[in-house]
Amino acid sequence: MDKPDYIIREVREGANEYEVTKWIGGKNPDDIYRCIHNKVNNRWSCSCPARMFTCKHIGMIKNWIKKGKKSFIDEKPMKDFIKQLFPEGRKI
Ligand SMILES: [Zn+2]
C-alpha cells in the first residue's frame, strides 16, 4: 500500500484556519480535514475523528508553519485539482 501524501493550505490568510487534504492516489483527495488554531488560548481543533487534544494533522500544520508554509508535495494531478478548487490562485 502506498503511503498517503498530504497537502496543507491556509483557508483564509490570517484567520488561523487550515485545511489538510489526504491523497492516496487518483485525482481527488481521500480525506479533507479542517483545523483551527484559537490564538486566544493557543488551542487547536481538528475535524478528524481522532478527537484528541492534538492529532497528526495539527502536528503537520505546526511543522508546515515552522518550515515556512512550503508545499509538501509536488505532483501535477494534485496541483490541477487544487487549481480547480481555488481558482483565485492561492499558493500551495
Ligand atoms: Zn486531525
Image: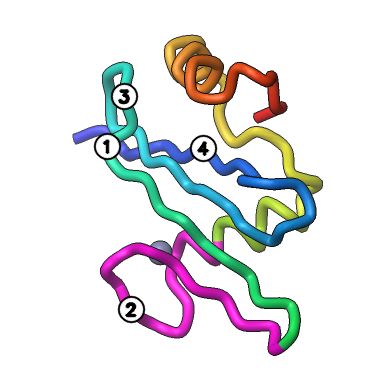
Residue 54 in the magenta stretch? The answer is yes
State the residue at coordinates (52%, 48%).
Answer: 19
- Find residue 30 and report its horizontal and vertical position in percent: 27, 37
- The range drawn in magenta is 41-59
- State the residue position of label 4: 7
- State the residue position of label 3: 28
Contact flag, marks 1 and 2 (Cβ < 8 Å): no
User: Tag 4: residue type?
Assistant: Ile
Residue 51 tag number: 2
- Find residue 4 and report its horizontal and vertical position in percent: 34, 39
Q: Name the one closer to the observer, 43 or 56.
A: 43
| Looking at the image, residue 4 lies above or below residue 53 | above
Question: Please, what secondary structure does the residue beneath circle 2 have?
Answer: loop
Q: Residues within 10 Å of mark 4 (few under 14, many from 20)?
A: many
Residue 51 in the magenta stretch? The answer is yes
Question: Please, what secondary structure does the residue beneath circle 3 have?
Answer: loop
Contact flag, marks 1 and 3 (Cβ < 8 Å): yes
How far is disc 1 from disc 4 in space, using C-alphas? 11 Å
Looking at the image, residue 14 sits to the left or right of residue 4; the answer is: right
